[in-house]
Amino acid sequence: MAGKPRLFGADYSVYVRIARLALLEKGVDHALVPVDIFAGDGVADWYLARHPFRRIPAFEHGDFHLFETGAITRYVDEAFAGPPLQPQGAARRAVMNQIIGLLDAYAYRALVWGVYVERVSKPEQGKTPDEALIAAALETARTCLSTLTRLQDGRAFLAGDRLSLADLHAAPILAYFVRAPEGAALLADYPALGRWWTRLAARPAFLASEPTG
């Protein structure tokens, strides 16, 4: 397919950053087309053709369009040259997909909205955090971190000995979580995961995808 891929979304979004990380780790030149779902006047009507639920990200490569982050990152890995981002072998690939499912179903809401938004974002806006919500989210976060540690099983990366889509899915979530004091303190209880986080946060692709806002 001809043409530079285009990713639609906002750089502050966890899921847009996941897709950007896949593109950057593969060395794919691409354009980020700004779409702010929190804009005062809402998402523009033209975007409905890109994403029927008006969420981000959406993706375009030539005349091929996608939405949903997992579909985008797997396509990027398989459609472009560069280091593979999915493990070889059914078992390791299944673990990768299990980790991505865990992050989507349990970690994102608890770590980002339950901890970061309540403890960091709300006070910055002059709002009062919901302490009960934070406490409940931290319990879920502990289960997520302990499970990730068990699945990592001493390896350098979450789903094996090489970087995979599981790592790229987890890192933007952790980036918000550790901005909250409770998040940083809880991660310290899992030193192997903490070492993984330090390595991921120092990767050129991760630094290049840092939100500008």
Image (tube, rainbow, N blue to C red):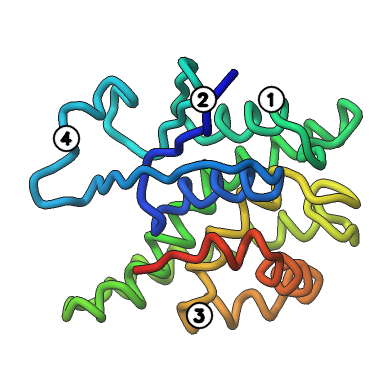
Alpha carbon separation for disc pair 2 and 3: 40 Å
- Secondary-structure class at tag 4: loop
The residue that label 3 is drawn on is 182
Across and down, in percent, residue 130 comes to 27, 71
Alpha carbon separation for disc pair 3 and 4: 37 Å
Residue placed farthest to the front in the image?
A: 2
The residue that label 1 is drawn on is 79
Residue placed farthest to the top in the image?
A: 63
Report the amino acid beneath label 3: Glu
Dot 4 or dot 2: first in sequence order is 4
Dot 1 or dot 2: first in sequence order is 2
Front residue of 97/69: it is 69
- Secondary-structure class at tag 1: helix
Across and down, in percent, residue 43 comes to 19, 38
Alpha carbon separation for disc pair 4 and 1: 29 Å
Report the amino acid beneath label 4: Ala
- Secondary-structure class at tag 2: strand
Look at 76% across and 67% down and name the residue there.
Answer: 196
Across and down, in percent, residue 28 comes to 64, 41
Front residue of 188/158: it is 158
Report the amino acid beneath label 1: Ala
Q: Is residue 68 above or below residue 17?
A: above
Mark linked to residue 61: 2
The residue that label 4 is drawn on is 44
Look at 70% across and 72% down and name the residue there.
Answer: 202
